[in-house]
Image (cartoon, grey):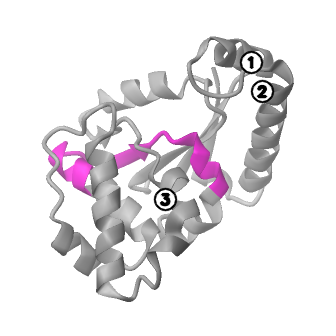
Amino acid sequence: MTQKVIQFIGTQRSGSNLLRLMLNQHQGISAPHPPHILRTFMPLLSQYGDLKVRKNRFTLVDDVCRWVECNPVEWSLVNFDRDEITDKITSLLDLFEFVYEQKCVVDQAEIWCCKSTFNIQYTSELEKVIQPFYIYLYRDGRDVATSFKKAYVGPKHIYQIAQKWSQEQMETTSFLSSLAAHRYVRTQL
């Protein structure tokens, strides 16, 4: 693998956390619990104003860093120098990459992994800046529905779960059809 970034895509409740934990055991891969940076901050991005203005960029950096620092599963030993980060980034995607790279450095790894399957919504942005290697997690929709019904997050009605699963599968397969075969792997759990 030549890419230094792994991005999971597919649907939640498809084994992403188990696979993340397994990858995180490899000394060369940093796979922290995701704070879902893109899902949380992309919809809010316009509220930060022009990111060419340092003050606006700093506010975004501070908010994202605080968000990561408050992640339910701690990113141990990572200390974010907000001024340094503000001077090095120009966009939310740059910030997303920088934050994960900082964790990768702390973990003394060569590759970082983001398990946030929500990032299927931001593949065009990911492709412009990061160009990760994608792991497409596929799980039978009935199993996903059963899992969602037991989970404390996500939809609970079978119709809503089926709609979400179907939409994410279509988005994912459509996106993967535009990529070269060496840029992704499909795995069924």
Q: Amino acid at mark 1?
A: Ala
Magenta extent: 102-121
Q: CA–CA distance between discs 2 and 3?
A: 24 Å
- Residue 41 is marked as 3
Image location (x, y in percent) of residue 67 = 34, 49
Mark 3 crowd level (few <14, some 14–19, many ≥20, 10 Å Cα): some
- Residue 53 vs 75, above or below: the answer is below
Residue tagged 2: 161
Q: In the depicted view, which residue is nearer to us: 2 or 163? A: 163
**Pointer 1 or 3: first along the chain:** 3
Residue tagged 1: 145
**Pointer 1 or 2: first along the chain:** 1
Secondary structure of the residue carrying numbered label 3: helix
Q: Nearer the viewer, mark 1 or mark 3?
A: 3
Residue at the (36%, 88%) spot, across then down: 53
**Quarter holding residue 168:** top right
Q: CA–CA distance between discs 1 and 3?
A: 27 Å
Image location (x, y in percent) of residue 110 = 27, 50
Compared across the picture, whether 166 is left or right of 73 comes to: right
Mark 2 crowd level (few <14, some 14–19, many ≥20, 10 Å Cα): many
Q: Is residue 6 magenta?
A: no
- Residue 40 vs 22, above or below: the answer is below
Q: In the depicted view, which residue is nearer to us: 40 or 129? A: 40
- Residue 94 is marked as none
Q: Amino acid at mark 2?
A: Ile
Mark 1 crowd level (few <14, some 14–19, many ≥20, 10 Å Cα): many
Q: CA–CA distance between discs 1 and 2?
A: 6 Å
